[in-house]
Amino acid sequence: MINILSVNCSLAFAPYLIDAMSVLETGGRAPSRTISQGGSGMALAQADSLSLIYRNRRADLNNAEARHYLATIGLRANSYEISLMSEEVVLASINGALLVSHPQSEIWLDDAAVRHLIESYQAPDLHPDPALPQWLQCSVAAGRLLLSDQRTGRWVLLGADHIAEFERRLGLLKPVAESAVPSPPVIPLKGIEIHLQSAFKLARTLVDFGQTRQVQAYEEIAPEFRLAVAPAVEGIQISDTNERVGMTAREALKWAGLIQAELTRLNAIEFVRGKITTVIADGAGGRFVLQWGDEVFVPAGFWNQARRMDDRLIHAADRGFSLLLDRAKSACVALASEELSALLEKPLFKSD
């Protein structure tokens, strides 16, 4: 998946997003448009900033923020070889599977299914092969391969260019080696889980309220969580998607201290670049780098070891950023120079 502030969308949108962000990066202005992939539509509106509207979520990016996401989406596009082909078909080699996306829906195929579809196209008289999942049917006529998804009733016609690309990608479908990766820590607050990406601002807000009795309402929405702060009868209320809790000024100062203590214990540090918040924190055997929906774990010793392209964690550089992509989750972070320095600082990266 691709995370852009509050928006979480399919990797199939990568070619369109790269085009739109590239125009903004160079100071141009592309016409507004609506695109469809995987059965979902995304609206792109471009003026002095770029607005993305997808599944009732909206993200507005200025030039600097677009450059950040252009780098992270570009690394995904290169690593997974995401290609927009004829008939609005997008192909991507996602580790051990081939993603076939088109405006109506998307289909995921393993190596055996891809091989069978190639053989079916080349020799249409072959009998159906159990290599295809039960929900997928195929037929060949007039040099086109029809794929029909029985779960949704959606279908897509593929041509010779698509099948040739299937053949080329057969050798690229390799599962990523499994490795135990810890989950980022969260801070419990009266039944609400506070994600580290929101913890620093919440602690500051609670201190301000405890000292001034004033509440500046705000809301933070990430692809996987939501946190809102507002005035309440009790004094201040904090809510996520499902829970709401209130607290007095005295309680607020107590909880602010608890949050700050946990952030200190985790050696956590926060950086804010426009709408992009980066938090770096200790984990078991390494460090977490968190940028809203993108959460990447960097194991101790990563920077000192020889790395291969089939490794789970990929490092690259683009547009002045140091990039880290977790190929298993498609989470990707872009670090500016001071953020990278904080990640590599020996007192913080203790186990390296």
Image: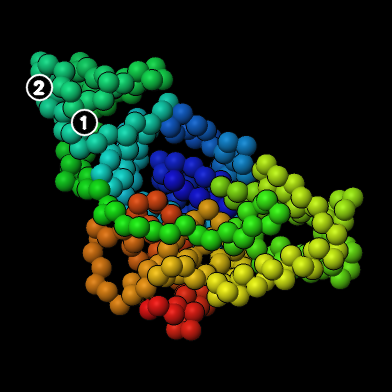
Q: Label 1: how many residues lie within 10 Å, few (<14), some (14-19) or many (20+)?
A: some
Position of residue 45 measured from the top left corner of the image (x, y, whole percent)? 60, 43
Q: Residue at x 71, y 54 (%)?
A: 190
Residue in the image at 86% along x and 71% along y: 211
Quadrant location of residue 273? bottom right
Separation (CA) of disc 2 from disc 1: 15 Å
Q: Secondary structure at mark 2?
A: loop
Res. 19 visible in picture: no
> What amino acid does circle 2 point to?
Ala
Using the rendered image of the protein, determine whether residue 74 is visible from the camera's viewpoint: yes
Q: Nearer the viewer, residue 273 or 198?
A: 198
Q: Residue at x 24, y 58 (%)?
A: 310
Of residues 333 and 65, the one nearer the viewer is 333
In the image, taking residue 213 as reference, residue 72 lies left or right, namely left
- From the image, tell me which residue sits under label 2: 123
Give the colour scheme shown.
Answer: rainbow
**Residue 129, horizontal then vertical, whole percent:** 15, 22
Residue 294 in percent (x, y) is at 49, 56
Compared with residue 187, is residue 34 higher up or lower down, i.e. above or below? above
> Who's the residue at 62% across and 44% down the image?
58
Quadrant containing the C terminus in the rendered view: bottom left
Image mark for residue 113: 1
The amino acid type of the residue labelled 1 equals: Ala
Frontmost of labels 2 and 1 is: 1
Name the quadrant containing residue 31.
top right
Disc with the residue nearer the chain's start (2 vs 1): 1
Q: Secondary structure at mark 1?
A: helix
Comparing 98 with 123, the one in front is 98
